[in-house]
Image (tube, rainbow, N blue to C red):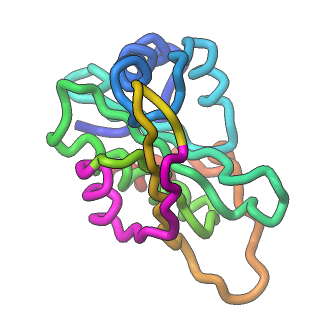
Amino acid sequence: MHCRLARPADAPRLVEIYTPYVTSTAVTFATAALTEADFLHKMQDVFPFLVCEENGQVMGYAYAAAFRAKEAYRWDVELSIYVDATAHRRGVGSKLMSGLLGLLRAQGYKSAYSCITLPNEPSLCLHRRFGFTQVGLFENAGYKLGKWRSVTWLRLPLGDFDGEPAEPVSISQLSENQIMHILER
């Protein structure tokens, strides 16, 4: 099992992994599945977009996105991780999380946030294992699949907060060797 940066050819598989989360769960508050074009757009962002492969098959993916649009938030990211239903509890989420956090630290981001629909003990356990702590609870934040759903927000500091921070760099500004070294850990 290994992680790598997502490629355009991965888009159909990413649609396959994500769609059941949209149609059958409240894990995401999305009510319409993403298209291949949506995934291609996400891959072109300045943030990492990773896939985890096993025997040539993409088993899950993870990416970061801007936490908020206002300038002072530019050191903060929000994470998303999705694992194929056939690959749960096999270490795919941990492998993706480790690689994603390593790349975000190398890029100079300071805080990672995750929003998790409750209940979702597997996701909460994964995040806690990496040191995330709860920073908020929004009760009855969304209505999906016939029920009001609450969400929790978790945060992980990625770097120090002393002095003037350097600007975060785009994933494209990291060398291929840096990326490979981080993802091989």
Q: Position of residue 5 (x, y in %)?
A: 48, 35
Q: Vertical placement of 131 versus 147: above or below? A: below
Q: Residue at x 15, y 40 (%)?
A: 90
- Asked whether 124 or 14 is in front, the reply is 124
Taking the magenta stretch, the answer to whether it contains residue 138 is yes
Q: Quadrant of the C terminus?
A: bottom left
Q: Vertical placement of 144 versus 112: above or below? A: above
Q: Position of residue 160 (x, y in %)?
A: 59, 82
Q: Quadrant of the N terminus?
A: top left
Q: Is residue 177 visible?
A: no
Q: Residue at x 27, y 65 (%)?
A: 129
Indicate left or right for 146 with 122 as reference. right
Q: Residue at x 27, y 20 (%)?
A: 57
Q: Position of residue 116 (x, y in %)?
A: 43, 49
Q: Residue at x 41, y 41 (%)?
A: 81
The magenta segment: 121-141
- Please tell me how many numbered marks the rendered image carries: 0
Identify the image quadrant of residue 83.
Answer: top left
Q: Is residue 89 visible?
A: yes
Indicate left or right for 164 with 130 as reference. right
Q: Vertical placement of 115 versus 108: above or below? A: above
